[in-house]
Amino acid sequence: MRDASQRVATPPRGATMRAVISYIDNMGRRDFLKASAVAAALLAAPASLLASRSAHAAVPEGIRFMSPSEYAVFERLMKVMLPLDGTPLVPLAQIPVLATLDVALLGTMPPHILAGLKGGIAYFDEGPVAEHGKRFTELPDDDAARFCDTWADSTEPAQRALAMGLKKLVGLAYWANPPTWEPLGYEGPVSERWGLKSLGNAPMPSA
Protein backbone atom coordinates (compact mmCIF):
# COMPACT_ATOMS: atom_id res chain seq x y z
CA MET A 1 0.00 0.00 0.00
CA ARG A 2 1.37 3.42 -0.93
CA ASP A 3 2.17 5.97 1.72
CA ALA A 4 1.22 9.65 1.41
CA SER A 5 4.50 10.57 -0.32
CA GLN A 6 3.92 8.00 -3.07
CA ARG A 7 0.27 8.69 -3.77
CA VAL A 8 -0.40 10.23 -7.18
CA ALA A 9 -3.48 12.33 -7.79
CA THR A 10 -5.64 11.16 -10.67
CA PRO A 11 -7.27 13.96 -12.66
CA PRO A 12 -11.03 13.83 -13.23
CA ARG A 13 -12.22 12.77 -16.68
CA GLY A 14 -11.49 15.45 -19.26
CA ALA A 15 -15.05 15.86 -20.53
CA THR A 16 -16.44 16.17 -17.02
CA MET A 17 -13.85 18.71 -15.95
CA ARG A 18 -14.36 20.77 -19.12
CA ALA A 19 -18.07 20.98 -18.31
CA VAL A 20 -17.33 22.08 -14.73
CA ILE A 21 -14.84 24.74 -15.76
CA SER A 22 -17.12 26.02 -18.53
CA TYR A 23 -19.92 26.36 -15.99
CA ILE A 24 -17.71 28.29 -13.54
CA ASP A 25 -16.24 30.48 -16.29
CA ASN A 26 -19.75 31.49 -17.38
CA MET A 27 -20.81 32.52 -13.88
CA GLY A 28 -21.27 36.26 -14.08
CA ARG A 29 -23.28 39.24 -12.93
CA ARG A 30 -26.59 37.39 -12.57
CA ASP A 31 -24.99 34.68 -10.40
CA PHE A 32 -23.26 37.37 -8.35
CA LEU A 33 -26.55 39.14 -7.67
CA LYS A 34 -28.25 35.88 -6.70
CA ALA A 35 -25.41 35.09 -4.34
CA SER A 36 -25.63 38.58 -2.89
CA ALA A 37 -29.25 38.06 -1.92
CA VAL A 38 -28.42 34.78 -0.22
CA ALA A 39 -25.37 36.28 1.49
CA ALA A 40 -27.44 39.12 2.95
CA ALA A 41 -29.74 36.55 4.54
CA LEU A 42 -26.81 34.52 5.86
CA LEU A 43 -25.44 37.55 7.68
CA ALA A 44 -28.52 37.47 9.88
CA ALA A 45 -28.13 33.72 10.51
CA PRO A 46 -26.59 32.12 13.62
CA ALA A 47 -22.92 32.82 14.23
CA SER A 48 -22.09 29.14 13.66
CA LEU A 49 -22.20 29.80 9.94
CA LEU A 50 -19.26 32.19 10.31
CA ALA A 51 -17.20 29.86 12.45
CA SER A 52 -13.88 28.66 11.10
CA ARG A 53 -13.08 25.01 11.73
CA SER A 54 -9.91 22.95 11.54
CA ALA A 55 -9.18 20.90 8.41
CA HIS A 56 -10.45 17.70 10.03
CA ALA A 57 -13.45 19.06 11.92
CA ALA A 58 -17.04 18.52 10.92
CA VAL A 59 -18.56 21.25 8.78
CA PRO A 60 -20.43 24.04 10.57
CA GLU A 61 -24.18 24.00 10.96
CA GLY A 62 -25.98 24.93 7.76
CA ILE A 63 -23.38 23.63 5.30
CA ARG A 64 -25.25 21.24 2.99
CA PHE A 65 -23.29 20.69 -0.20
CA MET A 66 -19.68 20.31 1.02
CA SER A 67 -18.20 17.30 2.76
CA PRO A 68 -15.74 17.92 5.62
CA SER A 69 -12.77 17.37 3.28
CA GLU A 70 -14.18 19.73 0.64
CA TYR A 71 -14.94 22.33 3.28
CA ALA A 72 -11.33 22.07 4.48
CA VAL A 73 -10.00 22.67 0.95
CA PHE A 74 -12.13 25.78 0.45
CA GLU A 75 -11.29 27.07 3.92
CA ARG A 76 -7.57 26.70 3.26
CA LEU A 77 -7.89 28.23 -0.21
CA MET A 78 -9.87 31.16 1.20
CA LYS A 79 -7.16 31.99 3.74
CA VAL A 80 -4.33 31.62 1.22
CA MET A 81 -5.94 33.50 -1.68
CA LEU A 82 -7.65 36.25 0.35
CA PRO A 83 -4.88 37.58 2.63
CA LEU A 84 -6.80 40.54 4.02
CA ASP A 85 -4.76 41.27 7.14
CA GLY A 86 -3.42 44.82 7.11
CA THR A 87 -5.89 45.97 4.44
CA PRO A 88 -9.05 48.08 4.82
CA LEU A 89 -11.13 45.17 3.52
CA VAL A 90 -13.57 43.36 5.78
CA PRO A 91 -11.87 40.45 7.63
CA LEU A 92 -12.84 36.92 6.66
CA ALA A 93 -14.03 36.20 10.20
CA GLN A 94 -16.84 38.72 9.73
CA ILE A 95 -18.12 37.33 6.43
CA PRO A 96 -19.92 33.99 5.84
CA VAL A 97 -17.75 33.20 2.82
CA LEU A 98 -18.01 29.43 2.91
CA ALA A 99 -21.69 29.43 3.79
CA THR A 100 -22.30 31.72 0.79
CA LEU A 101 -20.19 29.44 -1.40
CA ASP A 102 -22.11 26.39 -0.22
CA VAL A 103 -25.68 27.68 -0.47
CA ALA A 104 -25.55 30.33 -3.18
CA LEU A 105 -23.01 28.78 -5.57
CA LEU A 106 -22.58 25.04 -5.05
CA GLY A 107 -26.23 24.65 -4.12
CA THR A 108 -27.37 26.08 -7.45
CA MET A 109 -25.16 23.85 -9.62
CA PRO A 110 -26.74 21.04 -11.68
CA PRO A 111 -26.04 17.68 -9.99
CA HIS A 112 -23.61 16.47 -12.67
CA ILE A 113 -21.60 19.72 -12.45
CA LEU A 114 -21.45 19.54 -8.67
CA ALA A 115 -20.34 15.90 -8.82
CA GLY A 116 -17.57 16.78 -11.28
CA LEU A 117 -16.45 19.70 -9.14
CA LYS A 118 -16.21 17.43 -6.11
CA GLY A 119 -13.85 15.17 -8.04
CA GLY A 120 -11.80 18.20 -9.00
CA ILE A 121 -11.57 19.39 -5.39
CA ALA A 122 -10.19 16.01 -4.31
CA TYR A 123 -7.67 16.09 -7.17
CA PHE A 124 -6.59 19.61 -6.18
CA ASP A 125 -6.17 18.63 -2.53
CA GLU A 126 -3.94 15.69 -3.46
CA GLY A 127 -1.93 17.75 -5.94
CA PRO A 128 1.02 18.62 -3.64
CA VAL A 129 1.44 15.08 -2.25
CA ALA A 130 4.01 13.93 -4.81
CA GLU A 131 6.31 16.90 -4.15
CA HIS A 132 5.60 17.82 -0.54
CA GLY A 133 4.22 14.60 0.95
CA LYS A 134 1.22 16.61 2.18
CA ARG A 135 -2.21 17.50 0.94
CA PHE A 136 -3.05 21.11 0.08
CA THR A 137 -4.97 21.41 3.32
CA GLU A 138 -1.84 20.43 5.26
CA LEU A 139 0.63 22.82 3.62
CA PRO A 140 1.98 25.90 5.44
CA ASP A 141 0.85 29.24 4.04
CA ASP A 142 3.84 29.95 1.79
CA ASP A 143 3.86 26.48 0.24
CA ALA A 144 0.09 26.55 -0.23
CA ALA A 145 0.27 29.92 -2.01
CA ARG A 146 3.11 28.71 -4.24
CA PHE A 147 1.16 25.55 -5.09
CA CYS A 148 -1.85 27.64 -6.16
CA ASP A 149 0.37 29.85 -8.33
CA THR A 150 2.13 26.83 -9.85
CA TRP A 151 -1.15 25.18 -10.84
CA ALA A 152 -2.58 28.49 -12.12
CA ASP A 153 0.42 28.70 -14.49
CA SER A 154 0.54 24.96 -15.27
CA THR A 155 0.77 23.60 -18.80
CA GLU A 156 -1.72 20.92 -17.70
CA PRO A 157 -5.21 22.22 -18.60
CA ALA A 158 -6.94 20.42 -15.71
CA GLN A 159 -4.54 21.89 -13.14
CA ARG A 160 -4.68 25.40 -14.55
CA ALA A 161 -8.46 25.42 -14.91
CA LEU A 162 -9.05 24.00 -11.45
CA ALA A 163 -6.79 26.50 -9.71
CA MET A 164 -8.48 29.41 -11.45
CA GLY A 165 -11.99 27.98 -11.09
CA LEU A 166 -11.73 27.29 -7.36
CA LYS A 167 -10.20 30.72 -6.79
CA LYS A 168 -13.10 32.32 -8.69
CA LEU A 169 -15.67 30.52 -6.55
CA VAL A 170 -14.00 31.69 -3.33
CA GLY A 171 -13.71 35.25 -4.64
CA LEU A 172 -17.36 35.36 -5.71
CA ALA A 173 -18.44 34.05 -2.31
CA TYR A 174 -16.50 36.79 -0.49
CA TRP A 175 -17.51 39.74 -2.69
CA ALA A 176 -21.15 38.64 -2.87
CA ASN A 177 -21.52 39.73 0.75
CA PRO A 178 -22.73 43.37 0.82
CA PRO A 179 -20.50 44.45 3.77
CA THR A 180 -17.42 43.81 1.59
CA TRP A 181 -18.51 46.55 -0.82
CA GLU A 182 -18.20 49.54 1.51
CA PRO A 183 -14.37 49.72 1.56
CA LEU A 184 -14.49 49.88 -2.26
CA GLY A 185 -17.08 52.63 -2.34
CA TYR A 186 -19.56 50.35 -4.13
CA GLU A 187 -23.16 50.93 -3.07
CA GLY A 188 -24.72 47.92 -4.73
CA PRO A 189 -26.74 47.48 -7.94
CA VAL A 190 -28.29 50.76 -9.09
CA SER A 191 -31.38 48.86 -10.19
CA GLU A 192 -32.19 48.20 -6.54
CA ARG A 193 -31.26 51.66 -5.25
CA TRP A 194 -33.25 53.39 -7.99
CA GLY A 195 -36.18 50.97 -7.88
CA LEU A 196 -35.80 50.00 -11.54
CA LYS A 197 -38.10 47.23 -12.71
CA SER A 198 -36.40 44.29 -14.41
CA LEU A 199 -37.47 43.87 -18.03
CA GLY A 200 -35.76 40.53 -18.43
CA ASN A 201 -34.78 39.94 -22.05
CA ALA A 202 -37.13 42.55 -23.47
CA PRO A 203 -35.99 43.99 -26.81
CA MET A 204 -34.42 47.43 -26.99
CA PRO A 205 -36.92 50.21 -27.81
CA SER A 206 -37.01 51.19 -31.49
CA ALA A 207 -36.65 54.77 -32.61
Image (cartoon, rainbow, N blue to C red):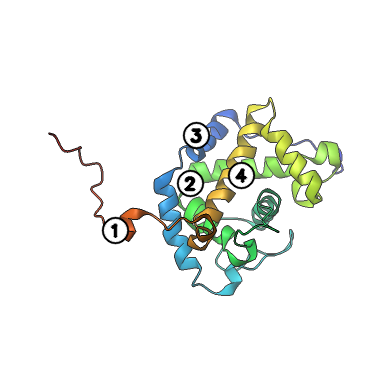
- From the viewer's side, name the closer residue of 179 and 39: 179
* In-image side of 108 versus 145 (left or right): left
Residue type at tag 2: Pro
How far apart, in angstroms, are the residues tagged by discs 1 and 4? 32 Å
Please report the residue visible at 62 percent of the width from the left and 42 percent of the height from the top.
119
In this view, the residue farthest toward the top is: 155
Q: Please tell me whether mark 1 or mark 4 is closer to you in this view.
A: 1
How far apart, in angstroms, are the residues tagged by discs 4 and 2? 21 Å
Residue type at tag 4: Lys
Which numbered disc, 2 or 3, marks the residue that appears first in the sequence?
Answer: 3
Residue carrying label 2: 111
Give yes or no for contact between labels 4 and 2 (Cβ–Cβ under 8 Å): no
Residue carrying label 3: 22
Label 3 sits on a secondary structure element that is helix
Residue carrying label 4: 167
Residue 87 at least partly seen: yes
Q: Position of residue 64 (x, y in %)?
A: 54, 60
